């Protein structure tokens, strides 16, 4: 799965996120993986590559990237946060709960529904996230 053209080049610091060697390594690794990964999985991969980065640094960097809007965060069924580089437009996710395969999807009906619910209840300036978990075709057939 290719990255959208609007994504920063591998290891490129994100606007609003101070650039360090460790943050650049985390950002570059996120550019390489298509599936969601936990902070621990990313930390393990960085250490296998010879990095001496602390797990706390990985967590803090992922949070900064999520706050900057360049990383998607999902919560698994067990409550663990997992991360992946995301596209720069609003989207939702279909996630396989077996293998983690994820598809970014548009949801015009969801957008209309969220706006309608907000207006009915006197809310404005709304935001929302939708994640749909299921079993992908490959996992069903295997």
Image (spheres, rainbow, N blue to C red):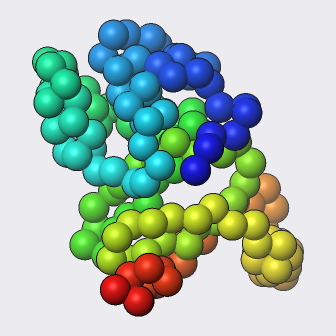
Q: Is residue 20 visible?
A: yes
Residue, x 27% and y 61% (percent of image)? 80
Closest to the observer, 55 or 42: 42
46 in relation to 20, above or below: below
Circle count = 0
Q: Is residue 135 left or right of residue 41?
A: right
Residue projecting furthest to the top: 20
State the residue lying farthest toward the front.
142
Q: Nearer the viewer, residue 26 or 32?
A: 32
Residue 119: quadrant of the picture? bottom right
**Residue 136 coordinates in the image, percent (x, y):** 47, 80
Using the image, determine if residue 60 lies above or below residue 1: above
Q: Is residue 135 above or below residue 10?
A: below
Task: Point out residue 23 in the picture as x, y percentages from the top left corner.
Answer: 37, 20
Q: Is residue 55 visible?
A: no
Q: Where's the C terminus, which quadrant?
A: bottom left
Q: Position of residue 30 (x, y in %)?
A: 43, 36
Specify whether 1 is left or right of 53: right
**The quarter of the displayed image where residue 139 is located:** bottom left
Which residue is rendered at x = 47% and y = 49% of the image?
Answer: 34
Residue at horizontal 72 percent and vertical 54 percent from the top: 90
Q: Is residue 39 above or below residue 140?
A: above
Q: Residue at x 15, y 28 (%)?
A: 47
Quadrant assignment, res 93: bottom right
């Amino acid at each position: 799965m290719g990255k959208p053209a609007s994504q920063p080049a591998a290891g490129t610091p994100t606007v609003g996120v101070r650039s360090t060697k460790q943050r650049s390594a985390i950002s570059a690794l996120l550019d390489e993986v298509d599936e969601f990964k936990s902070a621990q999985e990313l930390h393990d991969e960085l250490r296998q590559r010879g990095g001496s980065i602390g797990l706390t640094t990985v967590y803090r960097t992922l949070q900064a990237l999520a706050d900057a809007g360049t990383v998607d965060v999902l919560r698994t069924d067990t409550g663990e946060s997992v991360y992946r580089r995301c596209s720069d437009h609003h989207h939702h996710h279909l996630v396989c709960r077996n293998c983690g395969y994820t598809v970014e999807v548009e949801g015009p009906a969801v957008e209309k529904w969220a706006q309608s619910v907000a207006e009915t209840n006197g809310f404005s300036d709304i935001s929302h996230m939708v994640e749909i978990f299921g079993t992908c075709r490959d996992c069903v057939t295997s």
